[in-house]
Amino acid sequence: MRRKTDIYLRWVAWSEEDQTYIGRCPDLFLGGVHGDDPLKVARELQKVIDEWEVIFESDSRQLPPARVKRTMEFF
């Protein structure tokens, strides 16, 4: 099933400074989620993105445009 939020770039990367993995979706929210396992961080990031979609829908607002673009398509 395709989600409206599938257009947004998500990334999970190791932060040397914080000594943890950080997951972000910069077009939807500042900050991010973090943890020791990159797969768990990715799952938690998706939950937060889903929550943001619900918030926008409940407020009858459109999601913001996707500004951050992938540098390469994988499919």
Image (spheres, rainbow, N blue to C red):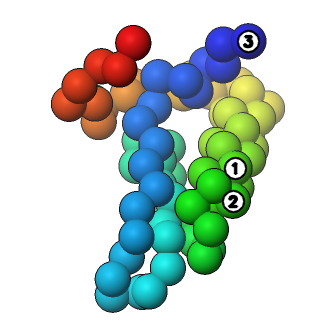
Percent from the top left, x then y, of residue 50? Answer: 72, 38
Seen in the picture, residue 28 relative to 30 is either above or below; the reply is above
Q: Residue at x 40, y 70 (%)?
A: 14
Location of mark 1 (residue): 43
Secondary structure under the numbered disc 3 in the rendered image: loop
Q: Are marks 1 and 2 in contact (CB under 8 Å)?
A: yes
Residue situated furthest left in the rendering: 71
User: Relative to residue 66, is residue 41 drawn left or right?
Assistant: right
Numbered circle sitting on residue 1: 3
The image shows residue 58 at horizontal and vertical percentages of 79, 32
Q: Residues within 10 Å of mark 3 (few under 14, many from 20)?
A: few
Image quadrant in which the N terminus is located: top right
Q: Is residue 58 left or right of residue 23?
A: right
Tell me if residue 30 can be seen.
no
Amino acid type at circle 2 is Lys
Residue drawn at the location 37% of the way across and 76% of the way down = 15
Q: Earlier in the sequence, mark 3 or mark 2?
A: 3
